[in-house]
Amino acid sequence: MAVVEEAPYRHIVVNPVAGSLGAEITGVDLSRPEEAVIAEIRRAFLEHHVVFFRDQDLSPEAQMAFGRCFGDLDTHPFVEGTQEHPEVIDIVTEPADGFNFGGGWHTDVTFLDQPDLGSILYAVEVPPYGGDTLFANQHAAYESLSGTMKELLDGLVGLHSAGPQYSAGGYSTRSQAMRTKNAEGADRVVRHPVVRTHPETGRKGLYVNRAFTIGIEGMRPDESAALLGFLFSHATREAFTCRFRWEAGSVAMWDNRSVQHYALYDYRGQRRRMRRITVSGDRPY
Ligand code: SIN
């Protein structure tokens, strides 16, 4: 198991943006990834859980090449990728949409048996104000719980499904610009530990989210609703968060094994266009 090292960075500059998580990395051109730079970005990613870059000029191909430095790329089961690259999703909010994709706390695709390791989002066009993305550190959320609560949660299994979001009428089916695939299979339920151990750092973290976790195995619906309600609120308390203000050319790369995120919709009547790729992950068990 890799340990997060504390040696100084030699090829990049890493500036934390908040006490709990998040760091801005400067001094790199992501369109020309060099091995030593990638190794340090990976280290900063594990240490800070979400890393940000500014002033990048990334074609879809360059973004994919950067993503492949961290693993294979995934294809979203319910959202169409671009015609040229099924792995690339254009996340577009049109002025008349009245909502945006990802506009609630969630961890990407936890409804899959092997949810994504990470996501890399590139800002193509941003509104003059608003449209920030918020991130919450799920290790910090777990570690702040009482010993008694940790004991209760440690052996529990969460039930996850894409049904609430991707079955007919789900939010992504209402977008003007984004195309959703057939939602067949969206109601399938998968099991993941409520407390997940990060495969690279060994840190434990909460692994439930409001968008896709629909219950806790073995509990009555009212019991799991009460416990999940507490966990959903606790996991996203202000102290565990950071917030990123986008500019065109900004990039965020987050660790889906460590964070939840929230794309804030507070730019009604404006256009926002992002490009997302995801890196495949392992089974959480
Ligand atoms: C997402 O949930 O991946 C979208 C995040 C964003 O658009 O800020």
Image (tube, grey):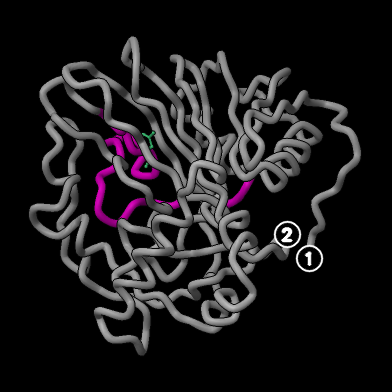
What numbered label is drawn on residue 89?
none
At horizontal 45% and vertical 61% (from top left) the residue drawn is 115
Is the N terminus in the top left, top right, bottom left or bottom right quadrant? bottom right
Task: Report the residue marked by disc 1.
Answer: 1
Q: What is the number of callouts on the image?
A: 2
Quick check: 256 above or below 243?
below
In magenta segment, residue 71: yes
Name the residue nearer the viewer: 5 or 183.
5
User: In this view of the protein, which residue sits in the foreground, 185 or 152?
Assistant: 152
Question: How far across and down, in percent of the image, does residue 148 sit?
Answer: 59, 78
Q: Quadrant of the C terminus?
A: bottom right
- Magenta region, residue range: 70-92
Give the left or right position of residue 71, taking residue 173 as reference.
Answer: right
Q: Position of residue 224 (x, y in %)?
A: 33, 77
Q: Is residue 73 visible?
A: no
| Above/below status of 196 relative to 170 | below
- Per the model, the C-alpha gap separating discs 2 and 1 is 7 Å
Mark 2 residue element: loop
**Residues marked 2 and 1 touching at CB (< 8 Å):** yes
Residue 103, picture quadrant? top left
Identify which residue is drawn at 55% across, 17% down.
56
Q: Position of residue 152 (x, y in %)?
A: 53, 81
**Does the magenta portion include 279?**
no
The dot on residue 201 is: 2
